């Protein structure tokens, strides 16, 4: 896969899709998460869950990550040029641990923001708890530098990783993303409901906001709203979209009174990954 992946980079087989992130309070679209895709000439779409770990292992993630950041910033700029939304839409980009620790990351991001004339707040970086497993002080310093640029910081898959809560209040984190595994069972399992509730309260107490990942049903949506979770992402709202579909989605959800979630057909179902 490593060799194939090298070809993929050279032959532009990698691309991005963007999954909408919605405000649960007012049904408005607030941003998108950029998600890497690989269209393999023989095997079709390969899941990032399969190729990102390989790229991480081989070091290719650095080049891939830089390309992802650049393309995501370019896209965010174009949404903002094409649509006036209030507040402006943000793009959320996943950073792998290796990429996070890559020297020059802060400079690279700073250059991209300038190149695309993107307000720093419109770029959100998703890191996982695994960046805190080694050298916490270095991680704190880096997060502070990123924060000084003005970009937003989010902890992805929150609750699944390194579970020391002691660092959380010391880190300049804007958002906790509740892992899909908790959200998906929250209507059926009291335990998962309690975990989601606890994360929402934790975030509120620390002055952070929360995004629920993997919202699939109206029951989950109702419970999340009841808990005061501000935003959500999941197939209930939309699958990750190709660039050609985004303008239409923004136009629909930027209405003063957007349609009820899930009542706009066409943004769900598609994109099944091959194993
Ligand atoms: P993630 O960052 O936690 O992204 C959310 C994943 O949940 C995405 O999977 C998304 O398609 C999926 N998802 C969202 N809503 C639902 C839902 O309602 N139901 C279900 N069943 N799934 C939902 P995807 O696109 O396969 O990405 C998987 C992981 O690959 C990502 O998890 C992220 O860790 C990694 N990844 C993707 N793109 C990049 C990238 O550009 N760089 C890095 N470093 N990692 C990436
Ligand atoms: Mg993510
Ligand atoms: Mg996640």
Image (spheres, grey):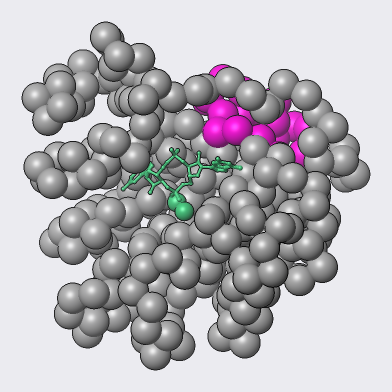
In the image, farthest residue toward the right: 257
**Residue 109 in sight here:** yes
Above or below — where is 37 with respect to 106?
A: above
Compared with residue 111, is residue 6 higher up or lower down, i.e. above or below?
above
Farthest residue in the top direction? 42
Q: Residue at x 87, y 40 (%)?
A: 260
User: Is 125 displayed left or right of 217 in the figure?
Assistant: left
Q: Nearer the viewer, residue 191 or 245?
A: 191
Q: How many marks?
A: 0
Q: Quadrant of residue 98?
A: bottom left
In depth, the one of 217 and 21 nearer the eye is: 217
**In the rendered view, does 225 fall on the left or right side of 116?**
right
The quadrant of the picture occupied by the N terminus is top left
Q: Position of residue 143 (x, y in %)?
A: 33, 73
The residue depicted at 79 percent of the width and 36 percent of the height is 262
Q: Is residue 112 above or below residue 121?
A: above
Residue 247 in magenta? yes
Where on the picture, by quarter, is residue 210?
bottom right
Please say if 161 is above or below 266: below
x then y, percent, for residue 267: 68, 26
Looking at the rendering, in which quadrant would you find the C terminus? top left
Which image quadrant for residue 44?
top left
Q: Which residues are magenta?
A: 237-253
Residue 200 visible, this orientation: no
Main secondary structure of the magenta stretch: helix
Does residue 150 belong to the magenta stretch? Answer: no
Q: Residue at x 54, y 54 (%)?
A: 180
Residue 268: x, y in percent?
A: 67, 27
Residue 209 position within the rendered picture, expressed as x and y whole percent measured from the top left? 61, 71
**Residue at 56% across, 44% down:** 32
């Amino acid at each position: 896969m490593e060799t194939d992946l090298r070809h993929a980079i050279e032959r532009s087989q990698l691309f991005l899709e963007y999954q909408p992130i919605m405000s649960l309070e007012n049904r408005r679209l607030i941003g998108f998460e950029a998600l890497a895709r690989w269209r393999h000439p023989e095997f079709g779409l390969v899941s990032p869950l399969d190729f990102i770990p390989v790229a991480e292992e081989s070091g290719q993630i650095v080049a891939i990550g830089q390309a992802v950041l650049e393309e995501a910033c370019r896209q965010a700029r174009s949404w903002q040029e094409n649509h006036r939304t209030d507040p402006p839409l943000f793009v959320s980009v996943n950073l792998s641990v290796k990429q996070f620790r890559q020297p020059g990351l802060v400079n690279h991001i700073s250059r991209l923001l300038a190149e695309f004339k993107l307000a720093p707040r419109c770029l959100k970086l998703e890191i996982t708890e695994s960046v805190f497993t080694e050298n916490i002080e270095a991680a704190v310093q880096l997060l502070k530098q990123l924060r000084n640029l003005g970009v937003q910081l989010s902890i992805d898959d929150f609750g699944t990783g390194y579970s020391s809560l002691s660092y959380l209040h010391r880190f300049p984190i804007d958002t906790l993303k509740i892992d899909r595994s908790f959200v998906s069972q929250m209507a059926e399992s009291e335990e998962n409901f309690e975990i989601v509730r606890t994360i929402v309260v934790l975030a509120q107490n620390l002055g952070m906001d929360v995004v629920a990942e993997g919202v699939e049903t109206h029951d989950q949506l109702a419970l999340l709203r009841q808990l005061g979770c501000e935003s959500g992402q999941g197939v209930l709202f939309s699958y990750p979209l190709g660039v050609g579909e985004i303008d239409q989605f923004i136009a629909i959800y930027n209405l003063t009174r957007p349609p009820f979630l899930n009542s706009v057909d066409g943004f769900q179902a598609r994109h099944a990954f091959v194993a």
